[in-house]
Amino acid sequence: MKDLYIKDLPGKIGEDVDLYGWVYRKRRHGKLVFVVLRDSTGIVQVSVKKQDVSEDVFEAAKMCEIESSVFVKGLVREDERSPGGIELSCKELKVISPSHDFPIQEDTGAEALLDIRHLTLRSTDAKMAMRMKMGVIQGAREYFAKEGFTEVYAPIFVGVAGEGGGTLFSLDYFGQKAYLSQTAQLHLEAAIFQFENVYSLAPSFRAEKSRTRRHLTEFYHLEAEMAWCDEACNEKVEEGLVSHICNYVGDRYQEELKYFGQDPSYFRDMKPKFERISYDEAISILQGKNVDIEFGCDFGYEEEKVLTEDFEYPFFVKNYPKDIKAFYMKQEGDRAVCADLLAPGGYGEIIGGSQREDNLDLLVERILAEGESLDSYEWYLDLRRYGSVPHSGFGLGIERLVRWISKLEHIRECCLFPRTPARIYP
């Protein structure tokens, strides 16, 4: 592993250093070649003067192309005209591995960039998005640790649906029908009887043919379940979590936020007290904006985009009609005891949560109403047979949260290798 990175150069002024990286940009002015080198921590300009190096080194500098990997030895000096105010005066330059005709150009289209995503990842945009994703996850884990949650690990292969059966990826599991997990929720509910407050971070899979800017078929799902917790308690944890994540990135990821044009103070100063509106109020807001929607309809991408336009901070929409929500949600009359947390500015849902149904008979009734076999859910029903308690939980889409924080145009930009209905390569 190399022991010097570009970020370390300001502390090496006046010293000769050895540096490894990739050619980011290059330009030539007669007997002077400027090679802009990048590594995982930044970029630095390397000046290669013909009179200061051997003929072989000067030729190597002239011939190396974009994304060639190189070794450079040189003197670190300050130069306000250079990127970051640092320049490396080259003494040696060696091409480790050449790169010819790198396929990414300024006018390369979005779909073409996804076709070569393995190369697009070398862009600064991709690096900053992945760093922001790291910051979101670090902030989440810090919050859960502070609040005394236990991280647990649920299976990816499952035998029953956790959400709607129409969005399951099915597979043959040694002669049995199995599915890729839509959610860890059911298994997390089992864990609360030992640990009380638990969370997990794992991929979830949804076979939805949605082609919106916020949908993926594979995404990272941050989920939590809490014993002895009603819906009001659930919402308190959710707003605490999201506020803490925002505070965390606002404080520690200012460079990334500024890169995406965001104000770190907005996130750093966010308070865990989000506005709450009812489903009925949300319908009224949408109808007042001439959206064609009736009471009893769920909100899709377009409806949430309009609904969130005039909010400054995340907010909850509470108590949806029970018929448009999942079987495991507790009900009061014709309503589900639930709340979705929506991000402002057109970004829509980032969390779905509810109090879970803890009554055995009511849960059996719901499962049968969904047309499911009780046999497949016997283990889940056991949780209500042996010491059931009031409990609640939620799921947060990591990529959706990153997209809102970074104000990215499409959720695909929040993934190393995005998976959508039209894309499984590379």
Image (cartoon, rainbow, N blue to C red):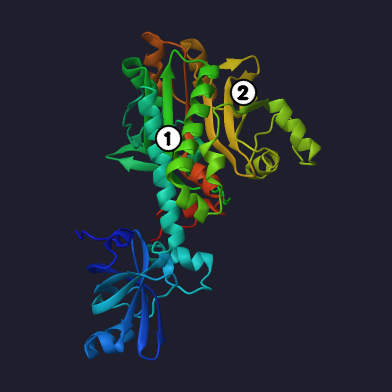
Residue 248 is left or right of residue 74, and the answer is right
Which residue type does callout 2 highlight? Lys
**To which quarter of the image does residue 136 belong?**
top left
Give the label on residue 202, or none.
none
- Closer to the eye: label 2 or 1: 1
Mark 2 lies on a secondary structure that is helix
Tell me residue 87's x, y (percent): 35, 71
> Taking 324 as reference, is 115 above or below it?
below
> Which residue lies at the image location 53% right of the left edge and 28% below the top edge?
239
Q: CA distance from mark 2 to mark 1?
A: 24 Å
Residue 295 is left or right of residue 13, and the answer is right
Q: Is residue 111 visible?
A: yes
Q: Answer with mark 2 or mark 1, whichever residue precedes in sequence.
A: 1
> Which residue lies at the image location 68% right of the left edge and 25% below the top edge?
278
Q: Is residue 204 visible?
A: no
Q: Residue furthest front?
A: 14
Q: Are marks 2 and 1 in contact (CB under 8 Å)?
A: no
Q: Quadrant of the C terminus?
A: bottom left
**To which quarter of the image does residue 319 belong?**
top right
Tell me residue 57's x, y (percent): 24, 85
Give the label on residue 322, or none.
2
Provide the residue designation for mark 1: 222
Badge 1 density bin: few <14, some 14–19, many ≥20, Cα 10 Å? many
> Taking 94 as reference, is 344 above or below it?
above
Q: Quadrant of the N terminus?
A: bottom left
Which residue type does callout 1 highlight? Leu
> Which residue lies at the image location 71% right of the left edge and 31% below the top edge?
282
Tell me residue 23's x, y (percent): 34, 73
